[in-house]
Image: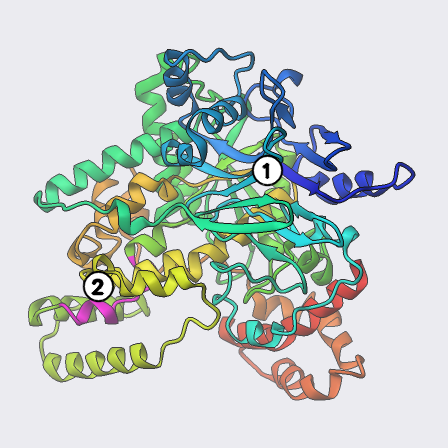
Amino acid sequence: MCGIIGLIGHKISPESDIKVRLLKSIAHRGPDGNGFWESVSPAVWLGHTRLSILDLTDTASQPMESDCGRWILVFNGEIFNFLELRADLVKRGFSFRTDSDTEVLLKGLIFFGPDFQLQCNGMWAFCLWDSFEQTALFGRDRFGKKPLYWTRLSSGIAFASEMKGLYPLLDSIEPSQDIESAFLNLFAYEATDWCPIKSIFKVPLGHIAYYKNGDFQLKRWWNTLDHLREIRIPYEEQVEEFKELFFDAVRIRMRADVRIGTALSGGLDSSSVFCTMAALMGDKQSSISQDRISGDWQHGVCANFPGSSLDEAHWAKLVTDSIGVPLELVPTDPINAGWTIEEALFQVEDPYITLPLPQLATYRKISELGIKVTLDGHGADELFSGYGHLNAALLDANVTQATEILAIQRSLSGLSYELNTKGILQEMAKERLKKIAKRILKSFGRTRDFVNLDRYDSRYRQMDALTKSLYEIFHFSIMPTLLRNYDRYSMASGVEIRMPFMDHRIVTYCFSLPWTSKVGGGFTKRILRDAMKGIVPDEVRLRRDKIGWNAPMHEWLSGPLRPEVESILRNPSVGSRLAPSIQGFLQKQNLSYLDGERLWSDLMPTFWRESLKSHV
């Protein structure tokens, strides 16, 4: 896991300090070292900052050249099945001088071309320079776990792992002309090539790009619809197959030559990951070194908000107690988080609906504990309807199933779970109409052609309504946005997040399942809860009240962050416009989380703009 940056076709004078500034701009992503490779004709400069996780020796440093010197690779990410891929390449006659996954990716791309990505299980963004063809190949993983940005220069292009890596090369750093529409729909653009900064673009998730002689060509290499299965086995066998896939996804993500851990939220998803790690280590203790699994994994870290209604420490401790390991608590308050609001927004780059302070503080604490890798629970909500997109399931439900769905919906809002058939047909009809109207009015906002192509694909159209809804939030809106955010939260402190639920085998399996495997038995996330029986404590496994990992914004904005909020009132360009929102919030009694969320949505565009002005 690292940071990559580079210039292709753009000459730099020998007196310029731009190369040092470029490496410094992404140094937080790779605090263990840096390096570069360059050629004069054509002008190519490839830079890398390293977070050492697999093969800690200098031999595995990047940029990495092929044995013949023709190809040079800079790579950000991890290939979790690198041992299996390496063994196959050895059979094909390749030899290896490192124990890294980087060399496996380099030689796999040389032999198979960009299709080698189909064999890779992991997360990545890379640039492979072919000095003979004078062509750059860029690649980004299936679901966009690792970022890759680029911009055109007066001659050639530049690329980087973060937008701020390109700022030293731009004539001016300004918000895109479409930023206002992005503020209105913060989930609409991450799966596209659009960025909130003018003249910067991203390589979209699941795409490759070729650059040669000034021509930059994008091509989609991954489509989940191409990899769906026909699953006819009974539900009980589905549970066992999912469990086997999940255990293996966790196992290969435990491969590391450093200390690893888990950011526990107290919910089902992260608890499933941590408890599965424990179960695996109970069975696999003798094969740790052979499988490159880290033996130093017993580290559960939980951000807590003492005295807040959003504090989840109790639930996280239930999980660590069940395994017999201590829980590391990170008491989080905005004053001691290590960043002001503007500093935090500059670090995470993109605007978002919640404050990033608790996440930044948690991963900083994780880094201070000597943990370089966490296995976290991201992705399960989008695969199994954790957000409660249950109206869609009603479109395919019979009356009995609809009764259960509506009871689940009520339980998610804090009411008890009770089956009640009274008035079910009327309520079901109302929900159907609401969903249909929502579909007609729904707009993805800014999309690329591949999004719309998926929606008209016969394989998508054959999905049930709930699976369609989950497919869209997983590929085009919520999930890509969260992956972007958590990359910034963790890499700000040089920590790598691995996500077993994002294993492509699990993703394609789950989108092949019917909606009844995801919702049923009185719960959302049905198949996950059933697979984790006897592994995760039932108090956590059967929780209904878990919400996303959010900061108590209403308490912070009215308390310790109040001076920063009030500072906006003194801003002549926006103070009068935002005064009603700010004053109404500060004067209100019995503030709720939703009150804080509404105020933040009003304030965030101003804070975001100010963060850009004050840090560039």
Label 2 sits on a secondary structure element that is helix
Q: Amino acid at mark 1?
A: Thr
The answer to whether 455 is drawn above or below residue 539 in the figure is below
Provide the residue designation for mark 1.
135
* Local crowd size for mark 2, using a 10 Å CA cut-off: few (<14), some (14–19), many (≥20): few
Give coordinates of residue 226: x percent, y percent: 27, 47
Provide the residue designation for mark 2.
461
Q: Is residue 563 magenta?
A: no
Image quarter (top left, top right, bottom left or bottom right) of the C terminus: bottom right
The answer to whether 585 is drawn above or below residue 66 in the figure is below
Which quadrant holds residue 518? bottom left
Going from N to C along the chain, the mark reached first, 1 or 2, is 1
Can I make out residue 311 in this image? no
Give coordinates of residue 333: x percent, y percent: 64, 56
Instruction: Tell me if label 1 and label 2 are in contact, CB under 8 Å.
Output: no
Query: Residue 528 or 473: which is nearer the viewer?
Result: 473
Magenta stretch, main secondary structure class: loop
Query: Residue 133 or 48: which is nearer the viewer?
Result: 133
Color encoding of the figure: rainbow
Give coordinates of residue 56: x percent, y percent: 61, 19
Task: Report the mark closest to the observer, 1 or 2.
Answer: 1
The reply, left or right, for residue 530 in relation to residue 189 is left
The reply, left or right, for residue 261 in relation to residue 150 is left
Which quadrant holds residue 86? top left
The residue stretch that appears in magenta: 385-396
The answer to whether 264 is drawn above or below residue 261 in the figure is below
Furthest residue toward right: 15
Query: Residue 213 or 331: which is nearer the viewer?
Result: 213
Label 1 sits on a secondary structure element that is strand
